[in-house]
Amino acid sequence: MVLVCASANVHKVEEMNALLTDIVHLVPRPAELGEVHETGSTLLENAVIKAEAVAAFAHADAIADDTGLEVDALDGAPGVWSARFAGEPQSDARNRALLLERLDGIVNRSARFRTVLAIVRADGTVIHADGTCNGTIALTERGDNGFGYDSVFIPNDGDGRTFAELSSDEKNAMSHRARAVVALRELLPTP
């Protein structure tokens, strides 16, 4: 199956390619497409908006994801606003700093990463799946791998290291995106 990847985030594309390589050939997002505005109020809405825009532009099947970090002590924030948590211009470092500031002194640091993957077929059919990884927010940033909130997220299924302290293979074995891919595989035709 050939899918045009809607993400402009190189890190997400690398993860999706590693997770889907045996069943999907990912084609890069058309550079001339420009920015697609995420105007949805849910992760699913944003994933579908991005996939629809790319599918229409490329006249091909497209895949998109939207991911949010949901922190219990912040009533689920930043959630759908995770990439823009600290405002514009978008900055992973500022987002992490604001998150740690808001959680300063808070004991309950439970959180989850949630990913929604959506495939929009050229005929308009939508297939979607989601994945979740539960964990806690670290007191400080740790690790140099990964991106986004990886250096502050400690997965419950791990050994106490943050996503940014894990290798790509270790992260891909338990991440929210990996779990969404597993769920999506069940919905795709077998080769």
Image (cartoon, rainbow, N blue to C red):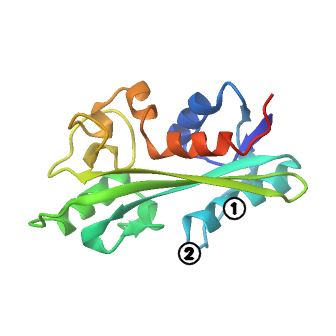
Q: What element carries label 2?
A: loop
Front residue (pair 136, 182): 182
The residue type indicated by label 2 comes to: Ser
Q: Which of marks 2 and 1 is nearer the N terminus?
A: 2
Q: Distance between the residues labelled 2 and 1?
A: 12 Å
Regarding residue 89, the answer to whether it shows in the image is no
In which quadrant of the rendered view does residue 191 lie? top right
Residue 169 location, x and y as percent? Answer: 43, 25
Judge the density around disc 1: few (<14), some (14-19), many (≥20) Cα neighbours within 10 Å: many
Judge the density around disc 2: few (<14), some (14-19), many (≥20) Cα neighbours within 10 Å: few
Q: Name the residue under label 1.
A: 48
In which quadrant of the rendered view does residue 81 lie? bottom left
Front residue (pair 38, 70): 70
Q: Residue at x 75, y 44 (%)?
A: 30
The residue type indicated by label 1 comes to: Val
Q: What element carries label 1?
A: helix
Residue 157 location, x and y as percent? Answer: 31, 40
Residue 19 location, x and y as percent? Answer: 58, 32
Q: Name the residue under label 2.
A: 41
Q: In this view, does 75 lie above or below 88?
A: below
Q: Which residue is drawn at 74% across and 35% down?
A: 27
Q: Are marks 2 and 1 in contact (CB under 8 Å)?
A: no
- Which mark is drawn over residue 8? none
12 left or right, relative to 61: left
In which quadrant of the rendered view does residue 34 lie? bottom right
